[in-house]
């Protein structure tokens, strides 16, 4: 079955179509959802910073209006992307995940970082270009590793102070310049919980629009060391028995997938599908 949401590049000079309105990971919404007739929106005197053609939903062209500030409009509310991740349908979340990344990039690339000149969208590709120094700036992606560390029937989960109360998750962190993803896995796990790992197995990836991560998911086996938590980043870390797990991350996250795959393997149950 063809996905309802298909990213595409088209010129924002064309009239018509539908639009989502974004500001700092929030979307304008009413009882019918987040898509509004674009020409109607453009009559509402919104503080528009940037406008991009971003793709098709059920075949209709979709544009993104990036706002300077989340203007209050009677009868409308601002809903967070996180809310759509937790409760929305998969196609809408994919559309909004893409829109938020393009919107954030568009907001942060209005001027050239080298010379300060205003930049313009490049024809034919998703890039902002500087006329003076001919630099092209593409949407930013941050490769990040995420790994489930296991020891027989036990799995190592941790809490960041940013998590919802009670929830424990797998360890994650951003790849640094010059390192491989495998080196990043070993370094992040060592930094966050003081543990050494071995036998890395790559399980899959996930684009994660909070704000622009590309998650690379691994299973890793425990090789040594006692848990020593990193101050500030890790509030608690424990070995949990697969039969007695704490509250876990959202079903749509690759963190949850990594846990569910291992638990399924240990308990001889069918493995879940990678969330897309
Ligand atoms: N989809 C999923 O299942 C999960 C996704 N994640 C994502 O993984 C990413 C990394 O996880 P964290 O534990 O927060 O990272 P982390 O362990 O590297 O620490 C976060 C710190 O890294 C620094 N930082 C922020 N952005 C950065 C960047 N682009 N490059 C390098 N350093 C940066 C900041 O100081 C920040 O406080 C986050 O985007 C998070 O949303 C995390 C857990 C689950
Ligand atoms: Mg981390
Ligand atoms: Zn420039």
Image (cartoon, grey):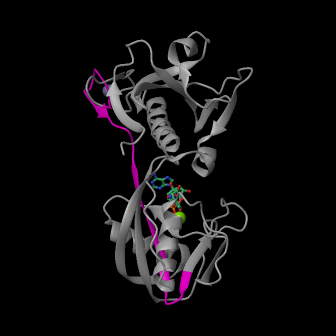
What segment carries the magenta color?
A: 126-155
**Residue 175 visible in the picture:** no
The spot of residue 214 in percent (x, y) is: 41, 54
Relative to 122, is 272 above or below?
below
Residue at 48% from the left image edge and 30% from the top image edge? 107
Q: Which of 45 and 185 is in front in this view?
A: 45
Question: Is 269 displayed left or right of 246 in the figure?
Answer: left
Left or right: where 95 falls relative to 33 = left
Residue sticking out furthest to the top: 43
Closer to the camera in the image, 93 or 186:
93
Image spot of residue 133 (x, y percent): 26, 26
Residue 233: give x, y in percent of width and height.
Answer: 60, 66
Depth check: give the residue in front, 176 or 115. 176
Q: In which quarter of the image is ligand 3?
A: top left
Examine the rendering and report whether any part of residue 193 can be seen. Answer: yes
Instruction: Report the front residue among 140 and 12.
Output: 12
């Amino acid at each position: 079955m063809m996905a309802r949401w298909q990213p595409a590049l088209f010129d924002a000079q064309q009239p018509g179509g539908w639009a989502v309105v974004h500001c700092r990971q929030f979307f304008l919404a009413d009882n019918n959802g987040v898509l509004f007739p674009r020409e109607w929106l453009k009559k509402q005197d919104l503080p528009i910073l940037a406008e991009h053609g971003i793709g098709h939903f059920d075949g209709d062209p979709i544009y993104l209006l990036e706002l300077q500030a989340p203007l209050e409009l009677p009868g409308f509310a601002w809903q967070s992307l996180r809310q759509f991740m937790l409760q929305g349908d998969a196609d809408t979340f994919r559309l909004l995940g893409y829109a938020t990344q393009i919107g954030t990039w568009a907001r942060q690339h209005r001027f050239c970082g080298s010379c300060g000149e205003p930049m313009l969208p490049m024809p034919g590709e998703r890039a902002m270009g500087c006329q003076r120094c001919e630099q092209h700036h593409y949407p930013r992606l941050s490769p990040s590793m995420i790994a489930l560390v296991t020891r027989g029937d036990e799995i190592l989960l941790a809490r960041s102070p940013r998590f919802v109360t009670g929830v424990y998750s797998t360890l994650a962190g951003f790849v640094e310049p010059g390192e491989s993803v495998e080196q990043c896995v070993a370094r992040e796990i060592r930094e966050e919980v003081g543990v050494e790992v071995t036998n890395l197995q790559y399980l899959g990836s996930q684009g994660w629009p909070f704000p622009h991560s590309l998650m690379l998911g691994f299973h890793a086996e425990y090789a040594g060391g006692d848990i020593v938590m990193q101050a500030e980043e890790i509030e608690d870390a424990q070995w949990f028995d697969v039969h007695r797990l704490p509250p876990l991350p959202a079903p749509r996250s690759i963190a949850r997938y990594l846990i569910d795959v291992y638990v399924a393997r240990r308990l001889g149950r069918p493995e879940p599908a990678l969330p897309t």
